[in-house]
Image (cartoon, rainbow, N blue to C red):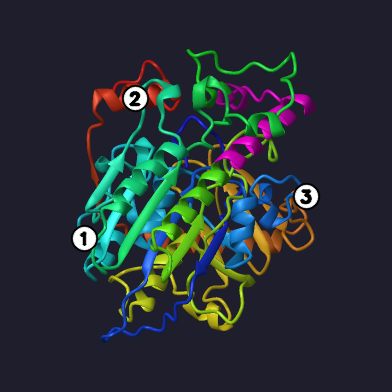
Amino acid sequence: MRLRPRSSRAAWLAFVILGVASLGCDGRTAPPWRPPDVVMISIDTLRADHLPTYGYARPTAPHIDAWARQALVFDRAYSEAPHTLPSHASLFTGLYPSRHGVLERGDTLAPSVATIAEMLGGHRYRTAAFVNCYFLGPDARIMRGFTHFDADYGGTDLSAQRDAGTTNEAVFAWADGLVGDEPYFLFVLYFDLHSDWEGLPYHAPEPFRSRFVREPPETYRSGDGTLSATAYLSHLNQNRIRLDAEDLRYLRDLYDASIAYTDAQVGALLDGLDRRGRLRDAIVVVTADHGEEFQDHGKLPEMRGAPGPSCRGLETPTPGRTDALVQHVDVLPTLSECLGEPPPAGVQGQSFLGVFGGAPGPRTTAYFDTSLGYQRGVLRDGWKWLEDPPTGARQLYDLAADPRERRNLAKQDLERGAALAAELARHRAENEAARVASERVEVSPEVHEALEALGYLPASEEP
């Protein structure tokens, strides 16, 4: 997820790979049943259709692909928002953005809203989070409930951001300190796919860079240390500058190389936890907060097709795939049911625990909802409706016939578009009426400077 400078996020598909080792999660709470450990991995800006698991031809993610073959992969898992902060807030609270109100810098989660870490902490879980992104810092309060909170943002030096490999080292140091048999909840956010590393889009170190990236075209201009990649790409979007095929090819190559690097670190994390005996009875969720766009709908990064939660660790007859429709808001109530407890009051998500036993998914409609002036939409019966408030543009796609969303049918199927627009308006009105009273906090000068360096704030804006 991003803040304001990056424009219209056209797609919201989030991959979810849920996996469970050998756990029967049926709500048993009496001894001697031990609650499962929970490992949640969020890969910022990961686009589902650039993974072999979702049909991509390039070998960008062999470790995730191998792990997914042992898990249940959700083919229709969607993020609620195309920005890091509101998307993770929905993941942690089970509420849509227009309900929890944590939309941009300075927004804070209301004390009355329970987080997933608070819920699990109430069940005597040890909770730990490792993040490399300002938006998930303590000011937003969506990280409440983590007794161990390790955040490394790198300051205003883009090249100093903590990479995935260094993040793993911090996780292992924490895991080595675990004693006893109390369950744990581990959340890890990898930020390497965010296009702000070292003034160039995407963190793609060797040997991954050489495997995927050819020489940049002569016409390509990236950030030069004074202009971050985000600011440069925002310049292209705001001025409606189209990159040619070679420029886009170069960006995709960098992106794929960064996926390959991050994938290697996901594999290293899971292997390291497994060697420490910490995955034996663990629910593992691998997901993304949003995807990335390469002018698919006329814009550059970021919101095209993020993978939704994939899960391993919940009892399922065999690993495989499901077309059950789920969203990030459904993760919290699923874990609640796994613990044999009702979800916190007011949660909007619906448990998909039954999917692991072969039951149909819990929902028929998914909502995309930011309230930030960016695109919003609704998906129902295989049709996706998108609205862009700043421009008034409307888009309608038949995902069965046009999964890559190339043919906008908004002007051809007026009746269907009107019905979906009415459903989206109903959803938003209901949430606006019941929105939780969140607070605003002042962003510190240091954080403001860092966000400015990343291209999210104009140089003239005051903190």
User: Circle 3 sits in a helix, a strand or a loop, which is it?
Assistant: loop
Residue that protrudes farthest toward the front in the picture: 275
The location of residue 208, given as percent across then percent down, is 63, 34
Amino acid, disc 1? Ser
Q: Is residue 220 left or right of residue 283?
A: right
Q: Amino acid at mark 2?
A: Gly
User: Is label 3 in contact with label 1 (beta carbons under 8 Å)?
Assistant: no
Q: Which residue is mark 2?
A: 155
Assign the magenta stretch its main secondary structure. helix
Label 1: state its secondary structure: loop
Looking at the rendering, the stretch of residues picked out in magenta corresponds to 233-261
* Circle 1 crowding by C-alpha within 10 Å: few under 14, some 14–19, many from 20: few
- Note whether 13 is above or below 441 in the view shown: below
On whether residue 247 falls in the magenta region, the answer is yes
- Rounded to the nearest angstrom, the CA distance separating label 1 from label 2 is 32 Å
Describe residue 395's horizontal placement relative to residue 271 as left or right: right
Looking at the image, is mark 3 or mark 1 earlier in the sequence?
Answer: 1
Count residues near mark 3 (Cα–Cα under 10 Å), then give few for <14, some for 14-19, many for 20+.
some
Q: Is residue 120 above or below residue 260?
A: below
Rendered image: mark on residue 112: 1
Q: Is residue 336 located in the magenta-colored stretch of the structure?
A: no
Report if residue 104 is visible in the image. no
| Residue at disc 2, secondary structure | loop
**Which badge, 3 or 2, is on the more N-terminal residue?**
2
